[in-house]
Image (cartoon, rainbow, N blue to C red):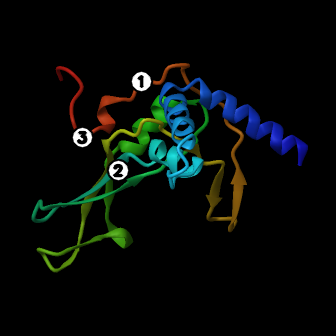
Amino acid sequence: MFSYILFLNHNFQGLYFCVPFREQLLKYYEKVKNPDVEENLLTCLAELFTQGILTNETKCLRCEIVTARDETLLDLSLDNEQNRSITSCLKNFSSTETLNAEDKFFCDKCCSLQEAQKRMKIKKQPHILVIHLKRFKCMEQLGRYKKLSYRVVFPLDLIACCYMFEYQCGPT
């Protein structure tokens, strides 16, 4: 139990150096002085982690209609591969995937299963981006999971990659 508390304390101290987190925390403590406020620390901080929007786009390859669905971006679950950087994991996450064979897409316009291209992109960036690196991989031939212990390189300052976002960053 003690080690868990130390772990949480360490994470909290690390988050305190994140400017939006610190500002939100200080704003909350100013409100706490007012007894009429119905907000608690968790709801106050939740705003920082739930302001992002992820768009899931699917394009039918027959009629070329694009279906888009927006969802709240809480975290990005990234596949973990050997000898990869966080940037290459982000590129892989936002790459286009072709749906065919057993994975065909039901197109509302064509009224049938069709081959399609699917991709995910960030429509609106959250203040704090939580990245979850997948630590297990399904080994279908063996019917079990393999734990991945790969090292993933990441920079101290991660600049969000333009290819992940709906809008363009500067000239293309």
Along the line of sight, which residue is nearer the eye, 120 or 6?
6
Q: Secondary structure at mark 1?
A: loop
Residue 53 location (% of width, % of height): 34, 49
Along the line of sight, which residue is nearer the eye, 53 or 15?
15
Q: Secondary structure at mark 2?
A: strand
Q: CA distance from mark 2 to mark 3?
A: 10 Å
Q: Which residue is mark 3?
A: 166
Q: Which comes sooner in the sequence, label 2 or label 3?
A: 2
Residue 58 location (% of width, % of height): 25, 59
Q: Is residue 113 left or right of residue 27?
A: left
Along the line of sight, which residue is nearer the eye, 171 or 146?
171
Q: Which residue is mark 2?
A: 54
Q: Which residue is mark 1?
A: 159
Residue at horizontal 31 percent and vertical 48 percent from the top: 96
Q: Residue furthest right?
A: 2
Q: Is residue 27 left or right of residue 8?
A: left
Q: Is residue 67 left or right of residue 77?
A: left
- Whether label 3 touches label 1, CB < 8 Å: no
Question: In terms of image quadrants, where is residue 109?
Answer: bottom left
